[in-house]
Amino acid sequence: MIRYKIAGLNVAIDNGLIKLNKELAEFETQEEISPDIFIKLEVSESVPEIKTEALVHNMVNLIYDVGSYYFITYYRPKFLTGLMLSKEKHTATIYVDMDKYADIDTENVVLSKNRDDISGPQELLYAIEVSFYFYAGLYGRIPVHSASIIYRDKAWLFAASSGTGKSTHVDMWRKMGYDFTDFNGDVAMIYDAGNAIMASSLPWCGTSQIYMNKTVELGGIFFLKRGTSDLTRCLNDVDGALGIISRSFLPNWDRELLSRTVMIATRLADRTKLYELYCTQTVEAAKVVKEEIDGGMEL
Amino acid sequence: MKLVSSFLPAQIGNRYFLLPVGQATVEGRNMLELNETGYDIMMCLLEDCSLDTLVDKISQKYEALGNEKETIYMLVSEYVTKLLDMNYLIMKD
C-alpha cells in the first residue's frame, strides 16, 4: 500500500503490483496516519451484479446507484471491469480484469485531455482520479477545471471548459515575461482551511504535464470567455458560485451529490475573489488580468 | 406528477435555480433561473403531487383566500402544463 498526501488529504492506494503514474509518486508520503480516502485494486473475474437502472449513461460508462454504493461500468474496457464507490466508508474498489492484470503499466501514461475518450491504462488513472474527487467532496474540496499559476505568492485559476483558451492565456503571461510559476495545467482543488481559502495543485493535469505538489492561498478565479476585447468584471457571490459549480469536477450523478457541490461552492464563493474575463488570445489579456490582480493586492 | 430526478431546485444566495443533474448534463440540458414561486412549486414537486395538492400548498404558503385561490389554480395549472411539455415533470400512475 502506498500513501499519498493530496490537497491536504491522506490517500492510501493498495495498487497490488501495478505501477502507478509518475505524477502520483511526487505526492507520496511516509506519514503512517489513517487514510481519509482508501482506494484498492481488486483483481477479479467477476464484479457485483447490478440489477438497478443506470443513473447516467454517457460515452464512456454507466453509473448506478446501488444503495450503499455507486458502481461504474465501462463500455469498452481494456483493463477495468468496474469501480465501486462506497457511500458508507471512504473506500473505492477498482475491479481489474484478471487476464489483463499483468499488462497494466501506467507509469508513463498521460491522461487524455478528453475525459470522454479514455482507453487502456488511462482507465485505471481515471478511476483513481474519479475516486479521489468523489471522496474529496466529502471534505469540502472542489476540483476546478482550470489552468493555474502562482503569482505574488497566491494561486490564480483561469477556469473554462476545454478549448476556451486556459493554457493559451497562461502562455500569454509567459510571453510577457511576467514573474509567475505554473501551478497546474488542468485542475486545481480549492477548499476552506479556516483562516484562508487554499488551492492545491494535483497529480492530475490533463496532457499538460504541468503540476506540482504544493498548496498555497487562493488569490482568485477568473472564468474565461472568448471576447473581441479584453476586460474583467467582478462576479457577485451567486454568479461566482454558479461559475464554480459549472467548472467543478465533483460528481453530479444525483441530487444528493449536486446539493453537496452547491453547498461547498456557495461557501467558497463567499470568501473568494471571482471574476469573469472576456479575453482575446493575445498578450493584452494577460496585461489586463495582471493589472486587475496587482490593483486588488495594492488596495 | 413529479419533477424528473435529473433536475435539482436550488437556492443560491437570494436567487433560485433549477440545475441539471447527472443524465441531464450529459444530454446538454441547461440550468434555469426561477422566481421564488417557481422554486416553491419545484420544491413541492420533488414528491409526487396532484395539481389540487400543489395548488393547496402554494395557496397556503401565500395565504390566498377565496378568488385568489382560483387565480393560483389557473396560473399553477398553466405553469405545470409548460413544465410537462418541456419534460421537466413526469406523470405518475
Image (cartoon, coloured by chain):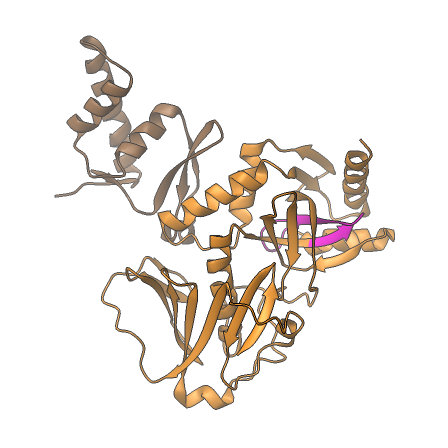
Q: Is residue B30 left or right of residue A218?
A: left
User: In the rendered image of this protein, does residue A66 appear above or below residue A220?
Assistant: below
User: In the rendered image of this protein, does residue A169 appear above or below residue A132?
Assistant: above
Q: Colour of chain A?
A: orange
Q: Colour of chain B?
A: brown
- Range covered by the magenta-colored residues: A148-164
Q: Quadrant of the C terminus of chain A?
A: top right
Residue A50 locus on image (x, y percent): 26, 69
Q: Nearer the viewer, residue A138 or B62?
A: A138
Q: Quadrant of residue A100?
A: bottom left
Residue displayed at 31% across by 33% down: B42
In the rendered picture of this protein, how many numbered marks are placed on residues?
Answer: 0
User: In the rendered image of this protein, does residue A281 appear above or below residue A236?
Assistant: below
Q: Is residue A55 left or right of residue B15?
A: left
Q: Is residue B28 left or right of residue A176?
A: left
Residue A196 locus on image (x, y percent): 66, 44
Q: Is residue A149 magenta?
A: yes
Q: Is residue A116 visible?
A: no
Q: Nearer the viewer, residue B82 or A220?
A: A220
In the image, farthest residue toward the left: B93
Q: Quadrant of residue B34?
A: top left
Q: Is residue A186 left or right of residue A82?
A: right
Q: Is residue A114 visible?
A: yes
In the image, farthest residue toward the right: A177
Residue A211 locus on image (x, y percent): 69, 64
Residue displayed at 79% across by 37% down: A297
Residue B31 locus on image (x, y percent): 44, 39
Q: Quadrant of residue B73?
A: top left
